Every structure is written in structure tokens, then in C-alpha cells.
Image (spheres, rainbow, N blue to C red):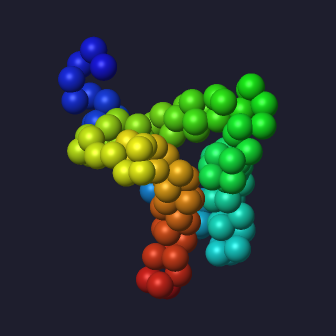
Amino acid sequence: MYFPGLDIVLSVLYLILLWEEGKSSSRMLLNHKKQALVAMLWQLPGFILSVSVILGLDQLTDFAYYFIFILELWQTPILPLISIIPVWTILDKPLYYYLLFMMVPVMAVYYYLPARKLSENS
């Protein structure tokens, strides 16, 4: 980024706004199942891409080769946070490769967590 460190600050700001959006939507929906459904639908493209790569469906066509790239685009707001981890290699792949798959359900749960916290406080 042109301003060093600003990408990390913006990623943290994204997570704060996402948490607040989760709280706001849980107040509006008043239903944990609906909140979970919203979280799943929000991350559905990421789930589809992740599952297709994990199951090897990304090798069926020439276009599917780009699934990892599309998944990186899907995770753009949090990629700066992923980039600060150490550069480790596991099974001939960099650690961030595996984190791309894990961040999809993590982000869905992160969006859903404020609904659980609000119900516990009620």
C-alpha cells in the first residue's frame, strides 16, 4: 500500500464495522437462525469456492484455475491481516493458502457472534 500500515488499520476498521453490522442486524432480525442464515448467505461465494478447491473441482476446467484468485478477491478486506503472519510452508503450500479457506467460516461466525452475545446479555 502507498501508506505503510494503513492497510492493517483499514482491515481492523472493517472488522469493527462488521461486528457492529452483526449487532445491528441481530437487533433487527431478533432470531438466531435468521442471523446464521444471513451469515451463511453472505459468505456463500467463499464457501462454494473453498469447497470446490478442497474437493479438487478447481481442476475440471481452465477457468477453475482462477478459483484461488477469486477467493483472494473475496477475502480482500482481511488479506492485510493474513499477510502479517509468518511465511511458513505446509505440504508445499504457504500458510496463507490454508488461511484463505479457514477465513470463510471464521468470517461467517464473526458476523453471527454479536447475536449470541446480545441474547446472553438479555
Considering only vertical position in the picture, is 69 above or below 84? above
Pick the front one: 104 or 26: 104
46, 30: nearer the viewer: 46
Q: Residue at x 52, y 76 (%)?
A: 116
| Residue 120 seen in this snapshot | yes
Judged left or right of residue 50, residue 100 is left
- Which residue is at the far front? 92
- Residue drawn at point x = 27 percent, y = 41 percent: 87
Quadrant where the N terminus is found in the figure: top left
Please state the total of marks drawn on the protein image: 0
Q: Residue furthest left?
A: 4
- Please, is residue 74 above or below residue 31 in the view? above
Quadrant hosting residue 92: top left
Say which of 5 and 118 sits in front: 5
Task: Locate residue 23, reporting x and y percent.
Answer: 51, 62
Q: Residue at x 61, y 32 (%)?
A: 70
